[in-house]
Each structure stands twice: as structure tokens, then as C-alpha cells.
Image (spheres, coloured by chain):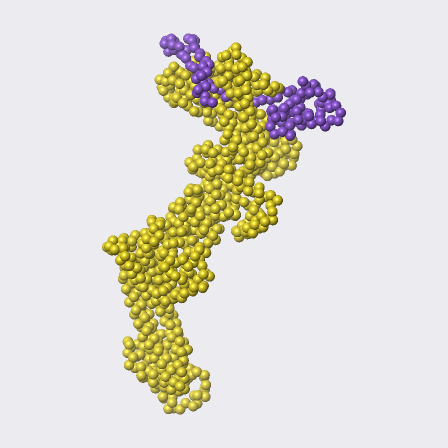
Chain colours: A purple, B yellow
């Protein structure tokens, strides 16, 4: 992706005409000239993602939600969070392990309510 | 009676039997004998008294006085020889007495022909003298024999004669030795040297004809060469020229042989041999120096070896033949063969069966040549290693030499001192030192695959590098940066290490096979037969050969101490690099990471892999987000187009090194776009959301003025600043800082970038601490303000250390160590003063619960020195105390 071509095609330019005599130095006022500065840009920003959960760490594995469960290598899509009806979030893999280890109906490890996956 | 004690058996009974008559007879014969002996020996060639001499001897022998005769004769003989022979001989060399004081190796200012003639005449004279005396000796012998014949009719007894002649030889050489003037060996030495030089120039000519290789460096003796060339040019026909050369050769060999023979006659065999041997060695040394000097790009061993065979060996052969020593040892010659000459029979061209003496000479010469070359190369080893890949022939030579001479320890010592003197100094950049270290490892690996000497040589370098702060950074740069990012004058060391990573891959695979326990017995047997003991110099405490496998990366990591530190540094650098990327092109990073994973293990590089994965994911999300936005928001077309100017790196912040994020107000449109982007992201990836690190990233700008267009690649802060000037031409620093949302001092620092580019001008405002910044209208004003302007400026806004987006390893360490500060301060309050070791141990002992103290001594030290510079502590005589 070449930036030059891209910019030429998308003419989004912010063209700002400034006319503010009281701010200008004297010679601007004398000339009564418009000053124009175009800025074209291509902005590469940096961000970090985070799970929109109330808690920081998974109640089961005590690892950060933004990290991954002990069995996973990659965070994010590969190790997602899951919410129960009780609004408690866990790593999907952690809670699945928990649920499967329960002989009878599983309960939320945090609040002991019956565990139901939130729709 | 003086002769009585000399009677053979001290048989006193004989005395009784002596009559007056016989005593008279004895005295008479003895006097006669003395006189005739005197006149015989001192008289020049006058043998007329021979008959008297014999009869007197017979007279004395009759009374059993042979031993008296013999002793007296030798006494007189010795006296005469000393007077006539020796002193006259040395007198020839008196004019050269000044020579003795001068150095052996100096070129003496004596005419060669003159010295030769002097030598000849002297030797001739003495040998004629000797011959004459031998003749006299023979007369004595004959007299004895004729007496014996008369008495008993005994046959000739050769034993008697041999005994007498050898005794004579012995007398001659002892007299000469005793009177030897100091200048004689020097003269002799010089003479041989000159002769040999002459010879070698001739031989060199032949040698050159024969081999036609290595043309330069052959003219050992310029003067001699010129003379020969003149002579040669006179020769029209090549044949005759060759013949002439051959004759010349012969002549020289003969003249030398003559001198040697003459000296041998006098019992100076060893002195003569010494003289010509040292002359040959000198010649050889000069030859080696001229061939091998300072050129490391070609192997010289072969040419030296063939030169040895062509010149000195030919000469020795001729000489030995001339001296008549040559005894063909067809069977034994194969027994003692040079370890380097593969076929001893063909090793001496023109000599069918090398005699034992010749083979010995060959071995001596080769050893000497190897040693000389080795010393030469060891002296220059530093330079050789500096341009290592090109100088590998020299290394190969050195290897062969060392195999032959076995003087590895010399190499180690000399190289280490060279390193200390030339490399491990404050002036050398860490990059250069590392580069040299890598070259050293590679070069020494050739010489010594077991790595024993490398261990010794590498030690000082490693120790030194450990003391440098930027070592890790340089190593990581070298490891990861194929292009050698840090500009260093000496080539691009980065390449070499990346290469090494590649090469190492193969080794690792091999090693995997080796370590496999399922290798069959045959393989095990093969391994066993290949086993070789460690070299004697090996340090037994440093593990055996197998563990000491030479592994460049291992040795490099060994400098740092642990691979964790290296990985940590690598992660920081990788983060820095990734965050500054405008596109998502990370192919080279992936490659490097894969290689590193092979070497350092997957688990330790897990975080780095996630970082790269984030980049790949970001690319996907980026396209995704843009596609959905353009789909959904058909209505606001402008927005969709704008979205194309935005791209984002989305990181999993837990796995990245700590990021330094500063608050920043982005320009309104950009902020809007980022908001949209984030919204879209959370729509796509519910329930995840984005948190922008606004001060991070990269912005490509194109500033369009009335009369020019300029391009920049800058940090977001700079972009925010310049974009504020779109709305307003002039800003005061306070207002601008408020608009952008950064402190005034930061703004002043950042805006310097634009001022230096000549785009913004600074002028004092109404308030003294408030500056006014104005955008410059056109080029004329720009040049007036002395700004440098260019149409295309590829500059990443931040070149200062503090503008790094990722916290440096030191900063991270400092943050981690801050926890321990109160521990340390408390400790010092209690104990007064503590040494570094003790603080370290105490921390280790007591800080076992969260956070566990796991820092190294060095890390603690650097932290403490930080505290010292903050004036919280004081360091006195190695003890830390609280500053009050």
C-alpha cells in the first residue's frame, strides 16, 4: 500500500482558511493576504485492547483477562472470555474446565449461583 | 737421569743392567733425536735429516724408550704448529679484527672476493703446514715400524699409526681452538651468508622458471639480482644462460665446499656447520618475511615450502655431495619423513634418493620456516582477525604451523596482550569489540575446533564487555538487525550474527540427531572411534570437549550472563521497532524471531511472538474495520474516505514491555476518526474495546504551503502541534500547550523540531515566559530564519533518548527496584554501613514474599549507584551508608 497514491486519490483535505486580523503580525495585516496551510496526513496510531469486564483477573486461574489462561499461548480471540448469567466473567477455557469437572450442576465459582452461560 | 721415569714399566731392574757405555749411547741418541726433530719440524720441507732421525729413534727404541720419543716428538710438534701454523693463520684475519665487535647480522663492509681469497690462502697455508707435519709424523711412524720389523719381524700395525694421527688431529684442533680470534666465526658466518645469498638469487631464478608462481618477494637480494640480470641479459640463448647458471651454481657450491672442507680438516666441522646453517636460516627467515609480510589474503606456506626445496635443499644436497658425505639411505629415508611432505621420494626434485642428512636438514628447515611464519602471524593476529573473512588463508597457514610446532600458548599470550592493548580500551565502541569478538571466535574455531584456546582468549573480552552498559543492546542489534542498524565503520557485524543464527539452525538439527538416545550401535561406535583427547592445554575444570562445543551465539549470550536478559532486551527493541512501523510489514522480524526461537527456546520468546501476532491481527482488524465503516456509513461519505488515512496497531498490552504513554490532545478530525475506529472495533470484537495510546504511533505528513510542499514522518506530538497551525497562524506557548494538552516545557522541547525545520518561528511574547510561535509563510522567510528545508524529510521526530516510546530496560529495572528502596534504606539505618554483597544477600534472605528479590548483583549495584547519585546514599570504601 503506497501512501502517495492513496493520498492523491482521497482528497479529504482539511483546507483551512484563516482570517483573523487581530492575531496576525503587522505585515500580514498590511498585505491583507490570506494564509493557507494544507496538511495531508496519514496517521498510524497505537492502541491496546482490553476485555470490557469489571474485573482484572480471571477468578479461576488468577491470570489477567487481557492475558490468557494457563493452557493458551495467544490472548484475545484464541482465549476469549465468557460471561455467566451472574455477570461473572472467566476465561472460556477455565470455566469450561470447571463446569466439566462438576458432577452435578455446576455453580459459578465466585457467587455459587447456578452457572448459566449468558446468551 | 731425566729419561728414567719415562721407562715403560718402571722396571728398575733395567737400570742395573745399564752399563756406562749404554748410558752414553742413550744420551747420544737422545740428543741426536732432539736435534733432528727440531730441524725436521722447523725446517721448511727439508727432509734430508730423515735418515739420522730414523737411526736415532732406532737407537732409543733399543732401550725401550719409544714413549719418550713419542712424547717429545709431539711436544715439539705442538710447539711448532702453534708458532708456525696457528699464529700465521690468524694473522691473515688481523685486518678484520674490528668485525668482532659488530653485530652478527650486520652487513660487513668487506669485499667478498677479498675475504674469499684470504680464506683460501689461509686455509691452504695451514693445510700445507699440516700436511708437512703429517709427513713428519709418518716418518716417525715408519721409524717405529722399521724398528719393530728389525726386532721381531712383526707386520705393520695400523693401530699405532691411527692412534698417532688422531692424536695429531686432536692437537691441531685444540691449538687452533685455544688461539681462535673472536672475529673468525663472524667472518666465516658473513662469508657463508653472502655466498648463499648469491646462490639463492640464482636458484630463485630457476625456481621462478620452474614454478612461475608468487612472482614478487623473490628478489631477496636486489643488488645481487641486478648483477645477475645484467649478466643474464648478455646471454642471448636461453640454453647457455641456464648452463651458465648451472656452472655458476657449481662454482659457488664448490667454493663453499672448499672452505668447509678446509675447516673440517682443521677440526672445525661444527663451527663450519654452524656458520652455514645459520646463514641458511637467516636466508630462510628473510624469505619468509618477504613472502608473508602483511598480506593475509593468500596462503604462503606452499610457496615457502617449495622455495625450501628449490633453494636451500638443493644447495645442501650439492654441498653434501661435494663433501662426499652422501650415503644413500634408501630404506631409512622413508622412516624419517617430513610430516608435511606427502611423498618423500618426490619431495626433493632433482635428488633421487635423499640422504638421511638431507632429510634431517629438510625437517630442520621446515620447522624453522613454520616457526618463523607462526611467530610472524601471531604478532599480526589482531590485524588478521580484524579482516577475518578475507584473511582466512593466513589463518589456515597459522593452523598448519601450529599443528607442526605446537606453540599454541604463545598465540594465546600474545593475542591476549594485543587485545588488552588495542581493543579493550575506552575508545573502542562496543560494536567494534563485539565484531572483533565474533571474528576471533570464527578464526580461532578454524585453528582449534575444540575451543580450548578460544576459552582463554575470550575471557578478557567477555569480562570487559560485561562492564559496558550498552553491551546487551549492541548484541541484540547485531542479532536482529541484518542491515547493521547502528552505523559502525567496520562492515556490518549484524550480518555476521544473523548469518550465525541461520547456520546455527543446521547445527542444532545435527545436535538433535546426536543427542538422540536411539542412535544405533554402529553410530555409537563411529562416535567412539572419532573421540580425541582434549589438548594438553585444556583446563580440566571447564568441562570436557563435548560440552565445550564452539557456539558463537552461546559465547555471545555468555557475555550477558543469561538468555533471559537478552530476551528481555530483544523484546524492548522489538516493541520499539514495531511501534514505529507505518505498515504491517514484519517479515524480517518474523524470520528473526523464528531463528531466535530455535536457539533460545519457544517459551522464553512467547511474549515476542504475541507481539508479532498482534501486528498481524492489527492488519486484519484494520481492513475489517475500514470495510465495515465504508459499508455501513454510505451516508457520510467524507468520513469513509477519511478512515483511509488512519491505521492502527492494536497490542495485547500485557505482553508488551511497559509503554510510556503521555496524555495528548489529538487534532479534532483525527480524534474523531480514532473514536469511530474504536467504536467499530468494539462492534466487531465485542466485548473488547480499544484504548488509544495517543502519544504513540507514527504520522506521515505532507505540508502544503503556498509555494512548497514538504514531507515529514513524525511522532503524533509533532503532528498535533503543526496541525494546530492550520486553524491559527500564531500561538502563544501557553495556549498551544493547553490546546494540545501537554505541559509547556514539553511543548517547548517538541516544537524545536519544527523550528529547526524552518516552519515555525519563535518570537518573545508579551509575557516574558510566554513565547509566540508563528508559522512561516514562504520559503524566503524560511531561509531568512536559517532553517534547513528539504522537500522530502524522512525524520522520525524523536532522536533524543527520552522520546523512546518504550521504557528502556534501565527504566524498567529501576521501577522494579524501587520496591526495595525502603528495604535498603531501613537496612542501612539499622546497620550503619553495608557492603554490596551483604545488601544483596540480605535482600535475598528477607525479600522472599511478593515481590521476590531476583535481581543480580550488577543490577543491584547499578540501582544503588542511582541512589548515590540522587544523594540518598553515599559510597565510601566499598560500603554504602546513608547520606545525612
Image position, residue B374 (x, y; %): 43, 51
Relative to A98, B107 lies left or right: left
Residue drawn at the location 56% of the way across and 26% of the way down: B614
**Location of residue B824 (image quadrant):** top right
**Location of residue B875 (image quadrant):** top right
Image position, residue B343 (x, y; %): 43, 57
Comparing B827 with B453, the one in front is B453
Image position, residue B707 (x, y; %): 37, 16
Comparing B463 with B503, the one in front is B503
The answer to whether any part of residue B881 appears in the image is no
Farthest-out residue, right:
A104
Residue drawn at the location 53% of the way across and 33% of the way down: B593
The answer to whether any part of residue B612 appears in the image is yes
**Location of residue B851 (image quadrant):** top right
Residue drawn at the location 69% of the way across and 27% of the way down: A97
Asked if B339 appears above or below B688 in the picture, the reply is below
Amino acid at each position: 500500500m503506497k501512501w502517495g497514491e492513496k493520498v492523491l486519490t482521497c482528497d479529504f483535505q482539511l483546507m483551512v482558511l484563516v482570517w483573523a486580523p487581530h492575531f496576525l503580525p503587522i505585515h500580514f495585516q498590511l498585505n491583507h493576504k490570506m494564509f493557507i496551510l494544507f496538511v495531508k496526513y496519514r496517521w498510524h496510531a497505537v492502541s491496546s485492547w482490553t476485555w470490557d469486564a469489571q474485573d482484572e483477573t480471571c477468578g479461576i486461574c488468577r491470570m489477567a483477562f487481557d492475558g490468557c489462561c494457563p493452557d493458551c499461548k495467544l490472548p484475545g480471540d484464541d482465549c476469549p472470555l465468557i460471561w455467566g448469567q451472574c455477570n461473572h466473567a472467566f476465561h472460556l477455557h477455565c470455566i469450561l474446565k470447571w463446569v466439566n469437572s462438576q458432577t452435578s450442576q455446576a455453580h459459578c465459582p465466585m457467587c455459587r449461583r447456578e452457572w448459566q452461560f449468558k446468551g | 737421569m731425566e729419561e728414567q721415569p719415562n721407562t715403560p714399566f718402571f722396571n728398575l731392574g733395567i737400570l742395573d743392567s745399564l752399563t756406562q757405555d749404554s748410558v752414553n749411547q742413550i744420551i747420544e741418541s737422545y740428543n741426536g733425536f732432539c736435534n733432528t726433530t727440531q730441524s725436521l719440524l722447523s725446517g721448511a720441507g727439508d727432509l734430508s735429516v730423515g735418515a739420522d732421525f730414523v737411526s736415532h729413534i732406532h737407537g732409543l727404541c733399543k732401550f725401550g724408550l719409544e714413549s719418550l720419543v713419542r712424547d717429545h716428538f709431539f711436544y715439539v710438534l705442538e710447539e711448532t704448529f702453534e708458532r708456525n701454523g696457528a699464529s700465521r693463520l690468524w694473522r691473515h684475519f688481523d685486518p678484520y679484527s674490528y668485525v668482532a665487535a659488530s653485530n652478527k647480522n650486520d652487513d660487513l663492509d668487506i669485499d667478498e672476493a677479498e675475504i674469499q681469497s684470504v680464506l683460501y690462502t689461509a686455509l691452504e697455508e695451514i693445510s700445507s703446514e699440516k700436511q708437512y707435519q703429517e709427513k713428519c709424523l709418518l716418518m716417525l711412524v715408519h721409524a717405529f715400524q722399521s724398528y719393530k720389523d728389525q726386532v721381531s719381524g712383526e707386520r705393520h700395525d695400523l693401530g699405532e699409526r691411527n692412534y698417532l694421527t688422531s692424536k695429531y688431529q686432536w692437537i691441531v684442533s685444540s691449538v687452533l681452538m685455544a688461539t681462535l680470534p673472536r672475529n673468525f666465526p663472524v667472518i666465516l658466518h658473513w662469508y657463508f651468508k653472502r655466498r648463499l645469498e648469491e646462490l639463492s638469487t640464482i636458484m630463485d631464478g630457476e625456481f621462478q622458471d620452474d614454478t612461475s608462481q608468487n612472482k614478487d618477494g623473490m628478489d631477496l637480494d636486489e643488488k645481487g639480482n641486478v648483477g645477475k640480470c645484467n649478466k643474464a641479459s648478455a646471454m642471448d640463448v636461453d640454453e647457455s644462460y641456464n648452463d651458465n647458471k648451472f656452472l655458476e651454481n657449481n662454482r659457488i657450491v664448490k667454493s663453499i665446499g672448499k672452505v668447509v672442507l678446509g675447516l673440517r680438516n682443521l677440526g672445525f666441522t661444527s663451527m663450519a656447520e654452524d656458520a652455514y646453517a645459520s646463514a641458511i636460516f637467516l636466508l630462510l627467515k628473510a624469505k619468509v618475511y618477504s613472502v608473508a609480510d602483511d598480506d593475509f589474503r593468500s596462503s604462503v606456506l606452499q610457496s615457502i615450502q617449495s622455495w625450501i626445496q628449490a633453494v636451500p635443499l638443493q644447495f645442501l644436497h650439492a654441498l653434501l655431495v661435494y663433501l662426499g658425505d652422501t650415503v644413500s639411505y634408501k630404506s631409512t629415508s622413508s622412516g624419517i619423513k617430513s610430516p608435511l611432505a606427502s611423498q618423500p621420494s618426490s619431495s626433493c626434485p632433482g635428488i633421487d634418493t635423499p640422504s638421511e642428512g638431507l632429510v634431517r636438514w629438510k625437517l630442520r628447515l621446515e620447522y624453522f620456516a613454520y616457526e618463523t611464519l607462526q611467530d610472524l602471524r601471531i604478532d599480526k593476529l589482531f590485524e588478521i582477525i580484524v579482516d577475518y573473512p578475507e584473511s582466512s588463508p593466513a589463518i589456515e597457514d597459522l593452523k598448519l604451523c601450529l599443528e607442526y610446532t605446537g606453540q599454541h600458548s604463545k598465540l594465546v599470550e600474545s593475542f591476549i596482550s594485543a587485545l588488552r592493548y588495542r581493543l579493550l580500551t575506552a575508545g573502542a565502541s562496543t560494536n567494534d569489540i563485539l565484531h572483533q569478538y565474533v571474528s576471533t571466535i570464527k578464526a580461532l574455531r578454524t585453528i582449534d575446533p575444540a575451543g580450548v584456546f578460544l576459552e582463554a582468549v575470550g575471557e578478557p573480552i567477555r569480562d570487559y564487555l560485561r562492564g559496558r552498559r550498552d553491551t546487551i543492546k549492541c548484541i541484540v542489534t547485531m542479532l536482529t538487525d541484518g542491515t547493521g542498524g547502528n552505523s559502525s565503520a567496520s562492515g556490518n557485524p549484524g550480518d555476521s550474527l544473523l548469518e550465525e543464527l541461520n547456520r546455527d539452525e543446521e547445527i542444532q538439527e545435527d545436535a538433535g540427531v546426536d543427542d538422540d538416545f536411539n542412535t544405533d550401535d554402529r553410530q555409537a561406535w563411529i562416535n567412539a572411534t572419532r573421540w580425541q583427547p582434549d589438548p594438553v592445554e585444556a583446563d580440566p575444570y571447564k568441562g570436557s570437549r563435548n560440552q565445550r562445543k564452539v557456539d558463537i551465539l552461546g559465547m555471545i549470550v555468555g557475555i550477558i550472563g543469561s538468555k533471559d536478559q537478552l530476551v528481555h532486551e530483544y523484546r524492548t527493541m522489538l516493541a520499539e521497532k514495531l511501534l514505529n512501523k507505518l505498515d504491517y510489514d514484519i517479515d524480517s522480524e518474523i524470520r528473526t524471531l523464528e531463528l531466535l526461537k530455535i536457539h533460545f527456546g519457544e517459551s522464553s520468546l512467547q511474549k515476542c511472538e504475541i507481539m508479532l501476532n498482534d501486528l498481524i491481527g492489527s492488519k486484519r482488524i484494520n481492513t475489517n474495520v475500514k470495510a465495515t465503516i465504508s459499508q455501513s456509513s454510505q451516508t457520510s461519505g467524507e468520513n469513509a474516505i477519511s478512515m483511509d488515512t488512519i491505521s492502527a496497531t492494536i497490542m495485547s498490552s500485557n505482553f508488551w514491555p511497559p509503554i510510556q504513554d503521555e496524555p495528548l490532545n489529538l487534532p479534532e478530525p483525527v480524534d474523531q476518526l480514532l473514536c469511530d475506529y474504536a467504536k467499530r472495533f468494539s462492534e466487531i470484537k465485542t466485548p473488547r474495546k480499544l484504548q488509544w495510546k495517543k502519544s504513540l504511533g507514527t504520522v506521515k505528513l505532507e505540508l502544503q504551503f503556498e509555494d512548497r510542499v514538504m514531507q515529514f514522518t513524525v511522532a503524533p506530538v509533532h503532528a498535533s502541534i503543526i496541525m494546530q497551525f492550520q486553524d491559527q497562524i500564531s500561538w502563544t506557548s501557553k495556549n498551544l500547550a493547553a490546546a494540545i494538552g501537554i505541559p509547556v516545557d514539553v511543548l517547548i522541547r517538541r516544537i524545536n523540531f519544527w523550528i529547526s525545520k524552518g516552519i515555525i518561528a519563535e518570537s518573545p511574547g508579551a509575557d516574558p515566559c510566554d513565547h509566540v510561535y508563528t508559522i512561516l509563510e514562504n520559503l524566503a522567510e524560511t531561509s531568512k530564519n536559517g532553517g534547513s528545508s528539504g522537500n522530502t524529510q524522512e525524520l522520525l521526530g524523536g532522536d533524543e533518548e527520552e522520546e523512546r516510546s518504550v521504557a528502556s530496560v534501565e527504566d524498567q529495572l529501576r521501577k522494579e527496584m524501587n520496591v526495595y528502596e525502603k528495604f535498603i534504606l531501613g537496612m542501612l539505618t539499622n546497620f550503619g554501613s553495608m557492603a554490596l554483597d551483604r545488601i544483596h544477600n540480605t535482600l535475598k534472605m528477607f525479600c522472599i514474599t511478593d515481590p521476590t528479590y531476583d535481581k543480580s548483583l550488577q543490577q543491584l549495584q547499578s540501582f544503588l549507584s542511582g541512589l548515590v547519585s540522587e544523594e540518598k546514599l553515599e559510597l565510601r570504601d566499598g560500603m554504602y551508608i546513608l547520606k545525612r
